[in-house]
Amino acid sequence: MILANEQAIVDLLSSDKETMSALRIVQSLDLPDWWICAGFVRSKIWDKQHGFSHTTLVDDVDVVYFDQHNTDESIEKELEQRLRSTLPTIPWSVKNEARMHHVNGLEPYIDTIDAISKFPETVTAIGIKLDTNDSLRLVAPHGVDDILNMAVRPTPYFTDSNQRMQIYHHRIQKKKWHNRWPKVTYLVE
């Protein structure tokens, strides 16, 4: 089955036990403005688009949130440990986007979606969470066409800077997504 639109993505992820388990565990932390994002979401979509029967293992599961009142990095490590103690098979990575602009040398983000919109590639600028009704929500600041078409391109934020474009180029060379997902194309290499 080929995914055709945002609702198909939501349906796919909502029916995936691993995804829903991860979402429920992160939801239990009650973090402000939280999302699971990037490769965890992208990989599930690309695996489906390629007809794979097994989920691709990811290097980490990115959990992002926004708490400008407590930006101590040690909190993130504590949250990772809590997640690992609940579901140790997942390589958790937790980041408070209220502090990540310092790490990345950028202007402050206004919220988590703003931070996601400034990820390097449109296909990683995607996030999911559970709302208060336990329904899956998806955010894709640059739309879902690139991820559905397996077309890798930089986000507009990255195309605005030669320095950021160097980071983008380095990432696509390092990630080699086309080795795992041969239908992937690079629109800007």
Image (cartoon, helix red, strand yellow):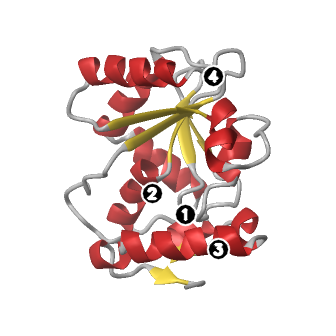
Residue annotated with mark 4: 71
Name the amino acid, label 1: Val
Q: Residue at x 58, y 61 (%)?
A: 5
Which residue is labeled 2 in the image? 42
Frontmost of labels 3 and 1 is 3
In the rendered structure, find residue 123 and report the number of the disc placed on it: 1
Q: Residue at x 70, y 53 (%)?
A: 141
Q: Between marks 4 and 3, how big is the CA–CA gap? A: 28 Å
Instruction: Check disc 4 and report its element: helix, strand or loop.
Output: loop
The answer to whether residue 145 is left or right of residue 186 is right
Q: Are marks 3 and 1 in contact (CB under 8 Å)?
A: no
Of helix, strand and loop, which one carries label 1? loop
Are circles 1 and 2 on residues that touch, CB within 8 Å? yes
Mark 2 neighbour class, 10 Å CA radius: few under 14, some 14 to 19, many 20 or more = some
Mark 1 / mark 2, whichever is N-terminal: 2
4 and 3 marks in contact (CB < 8 Å): no
Q: Return the disc, 4 or 3, that comes first in the chain's sequence.
A: 4
Q: Residue at x 63, y 22 (%)?
A: 71
